[in-house]
Image: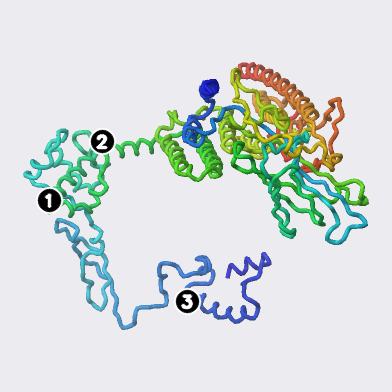
């Protein structure tokens, strides 16, 4: 334990970058922090995908049950996010029976049948060592394809998914130690020489159900999100902008030179 | 009346009442509203309501049995100390001249200045800085000039500031009141006892006032920016804190008070703001403070979505610029083929996106600079020749399509509830100063 306490000091000696008031705020918060010493400038992010898959029921469709849909939150790479997420509360339209659905085990999803599109609120509750504040996601349930003129088909579902990342800017040590090496999240680079305490042994992994969605029944419809394309786009755009900036700077300095000579020339 | 004419023009219903009721109430209103003696239009000028002061009743004529004459008579004024008799026109009714004092004598008011005896002076009122003669003179002046300290200060033989005079006067009064009072409780309610004159506070107040008055416009703008900044920070902290445990609320108030204390404290010494971090002149430094405070408030949340975080940072970046510039940034992003909100918001993507936006802002700034330089240059030149930029400034990347090699697979089924910005919204009309072209001649 001495190891970690000395490294705790090291972390706290890191210079504060911004306002002095942040320090005082931190000072005020230390009493709640004493149980969980927090590190600075380290964040854990959990990439997630949330959305819905909706199948048209075709022949079996009735007026009030035209589609069968599932709304869910999953790890972006289909890893098990229950390491971080304790439960998800789905708030459906009030016309549904028990519109508040609490899902306490992965996969975090709700399947229903209906006819209408509406906004669904998904509130993620985290484990106590992760964060005691819940986080809400909002998704507009989509049943009908964009292309309104096309015929409805039972074979291909309508899929709308959104990618996002849950960011924990101030992870506690216990959180860090528990999740190190877990594939569901991006683990930050710790400051050199920093040693996390060994993770506490949780339940026997054999007993726990698989929480990942790699073999999910709807898995074939899941979208894949790659940052590579967007990065390429952004890099190219930045290059263009930077080139233009350089050109403008040259033009401005040229003009400045010209203006100077004109000024001295026409002294009336 | 004018109201109904206006409503006619606008095509609005005249009154909220139904038609039948209208007919009934209208004639009633009509007889009320038109008063005697004033024409309809004049009455409407006052808004159709009776004026606060009673109007001149022009119909009331003096009864015919009275005999009115005007006489040139002498009068005395009780406000005068001498016996000067002046003359003026007097309205005499039925040969009876009016009685009573000169009508303006009642305005001769003066302040009651306490007078002290020498004994009282010896006992209570001595002061190291003030001699008895000076104090006596001060009080005489106060009496003569009705406590107009500015005049008193001007005429005082020994040069003293207004604050010093006030201080002496009020402290003497307090001492006298205390000395003369039967018991301390009697005087406790005297306004002078409850709120004594504090010379240092007065000096500070006047200094602050003159500082504010002599602020340049530049300073004013800076102050407004800093105040808005501080307000934003406290609001964000409030929002973040409110989401936390309730027992932090006590600290929150202390924090807020501190923030509030910072701002008015600063106004006293505007040139030496050492308390707030963002004091530099350049707007870029102000944005750095924006970023830092946004990051701080994000951390306070303990958990947030990266898209939310990016939104906040983009807002911080745009906080110092106007709406038009923001729209231009977005237009440029579109022209470059970049999503306004990244579809795959990983940390790297978001950082890159933010950097791109910042660079676009720099680009737009430079464009503006270039325009200014050009117009500067053209105004110096006598003739009409002015460098006309060949690329349209408002849409830098419009003409060249984004020709980066790889395919850009736009996932069409990934429609989010994003901003519905289409290419059909034209870029806002940019009011550029019209420069002389050679073709104009």
Which of the image's four quarters has the C terminus of chain B?
Answer: top right
For image coordinates 66% across by 40% down, the residue present is B323
Query: Which circle's residue, 1 or 3, is located before the other in the chain?
Result: 3
Q: CA distance from mark 2 to mark 1?
A: 29 Å
Q: Earlier in the sequence, mark 2 or mark 1?
A: 2
Height in image: B66 above or below B421?
below
Q: In what element is the residue under mark 2? A: loop
* Point 8% across, 42% down: residue: B123
Q: Chain of mark 2?
A: B
Chain where mark 3 sits: B
Task: Identify the residue under disc 1.
Answer: B180
Q: How is this picture coloured? A: rainbow
State left or right for residue B298 relative to residue A245.
left
Which residue does the numbered mark 3 point to in the structure image? B36
Residue B161, label in figure:
2
- Mark 3 vs 2, N-terminal side: 3
Label 3, residues with CA under 10 Å away: few <14, some 14-19, many ≥20? few
| Rendered position, A56 above or below B437 | below
Q: Position of residue B405 (x, y in %)?
A: 86, 25
Q: Quadrant of residue B422?
A: top right
In the rendered image, the quadrant that contains the N terminus of chain B is bottom right
Viewer can see residue B375: no
Q: CA distance from mark 1 to mark 3?
A: 61 Å
**Circles 2, 1 touching at the beta carbon (< 8 Å):** no
- Is disc 3 on the same chain as disc 1? yes
Name the front one of labels 2 and 1. Answer: 1
Q: Residue at x 31, y 37 (%)?
A: B203
Q: Classify 10 Å Cα crowding around label 1: few (below 14), some (14-19), many (20 and above).
A: few
Classify mark 3: helix, strand or loop.
loop
């Amino acid at each position: 334990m001495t190891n970690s306490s000395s490294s705790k000091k090291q972390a706290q000696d890191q210079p504060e970058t911004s306002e002095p008031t942040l320090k005082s705020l931190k000072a005020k918060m230390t009493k709640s922090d004493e149980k969980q010493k927090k590190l600075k400038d380290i964040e854990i992010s959990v990439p997630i995908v949330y959305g819905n898959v909706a199948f048209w029921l075709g022949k079996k469709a009735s007026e009030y049950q035209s589609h069968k849909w599932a709304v869910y939150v999953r790890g972006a790479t289909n890893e098990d996010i229950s390491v971080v997420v304790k439960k998800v509360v789905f708030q459906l339209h009030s016309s549904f029976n028990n519109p508040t659905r609490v899902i306490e085990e992965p996969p975090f999803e709700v399947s229903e049948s209906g006819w209408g599109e509406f906004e669904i609120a998904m509130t993620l509750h985290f484990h106590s060592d992760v964060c005691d504040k819940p986080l809400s996601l909002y998704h507009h349930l989509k049943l009908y394809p964009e292309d309104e003129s096309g015929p409805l088909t039972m074979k291909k579902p309508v899929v709308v998914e959104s990618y996002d990342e849950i960011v924990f800017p101030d992870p506690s040590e216990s959180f860090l130690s528990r999740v190190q090496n877990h594939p569901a999240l991006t683990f930050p680079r710790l400051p050199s020489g920093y040693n996390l305490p060994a993770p506490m042994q949780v339940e026997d992994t054999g007993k726990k159900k698989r929480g990942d969605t790699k073999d999910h029944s709807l898995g074939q419809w899941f979208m894949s999100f790659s940052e590579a394309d967007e990065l390429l786009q952004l890099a190219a755009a930045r290059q263009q902008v930077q080139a233009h900036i350089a050109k403008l700077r040259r033009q401005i300095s040229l003009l400045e030179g010209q203006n100077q000579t004109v000024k001295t020339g026409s002294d009336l | 009346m004018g109201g109904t004419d206006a409503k006619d023009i606008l095509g609005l219903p005249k009154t909220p009442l139904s038609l039948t009721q209208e007919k009934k109430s209208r004639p009633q209103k009509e007889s009320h509203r038109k008063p005697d003696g004033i024409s309809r239009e004049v009455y409407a000028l006052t808004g159709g309501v009776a004026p606060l002061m009673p109007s001149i009743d022009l119909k009331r004529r003096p009864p015919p049995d009275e005999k009115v004459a005007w006489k040139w008579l002498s009068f005395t004024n009780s406000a005068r100390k001498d016996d000067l008799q002046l003359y003026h026109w007097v309205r005499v009714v039925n040969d009876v001249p009016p009685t009573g004092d000169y009508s303006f004598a009642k305005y001769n008011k003066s302040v009651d200045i306490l007078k002290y005896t020498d004994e009282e002076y010896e006992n209570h009122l001595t002061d190291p800085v003030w001699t008895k003669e000076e104090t006596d003179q001060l009080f005489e002046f106060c009496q003569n000039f009705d406590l107009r300290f500015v005049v008193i200060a001007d005429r005082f033989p020994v040069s003293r500031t207004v604050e010093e005079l006030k201080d002496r006067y009020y402290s003497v009064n307090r001492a006298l009141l205390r000395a003369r009072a039967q018991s301390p409780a009697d005087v406790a309610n005297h306004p002078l006892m409850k709120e004594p004159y504090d010379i240092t506070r007065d000096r500070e107040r006047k200094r602050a006032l003159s500082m504010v008055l002599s602020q340049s416009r530049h300073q004013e703008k800076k102050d407004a920016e800093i105040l808005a900044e501080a307000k934003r920070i406290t609001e964000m902290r409030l929002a973040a804190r409110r989401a936390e445990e309730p027992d932090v609320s006590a600290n929150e108030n202390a924090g807020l008070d501190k923030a509030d204390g910072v701002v008015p404290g600063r106004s006293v010494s505007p040139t030496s703001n050492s308390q707030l971090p963002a004091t530099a002149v350049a707007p870029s430094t102000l944005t750095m403070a924006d970023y830092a405070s946004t990051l701080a408030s994000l951390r306070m949340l303990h958990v947030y979505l990266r898209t939310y975080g990016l939104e906040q940072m983009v807002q911080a970046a745009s906080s110092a610029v106007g709406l038009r510039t923001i729209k231009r940034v977005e237009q440029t992003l579109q022209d470059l083929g970049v999503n306004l909100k990244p579809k795959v918001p990983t940390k790297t993507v978001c950082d890159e996106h933010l950097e791109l936006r910042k660079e676009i802002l720099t680009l737009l700034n430079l464009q503006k600079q270039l325009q200014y330089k050009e117009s500067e240059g053209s105004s110096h030149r006598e003739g009409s020749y002015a460098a006309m930029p060949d690329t349209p400034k408002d849409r830098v990347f419009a003409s060249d399509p984004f020709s980066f090699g790889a395919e850009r697979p736009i996932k069409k089924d990934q429609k989010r509830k994003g901003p519905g910005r289409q290419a059909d919204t034209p870029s806002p009309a940019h009011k550029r100063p019209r420069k002389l072209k050679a073709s104009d001649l």
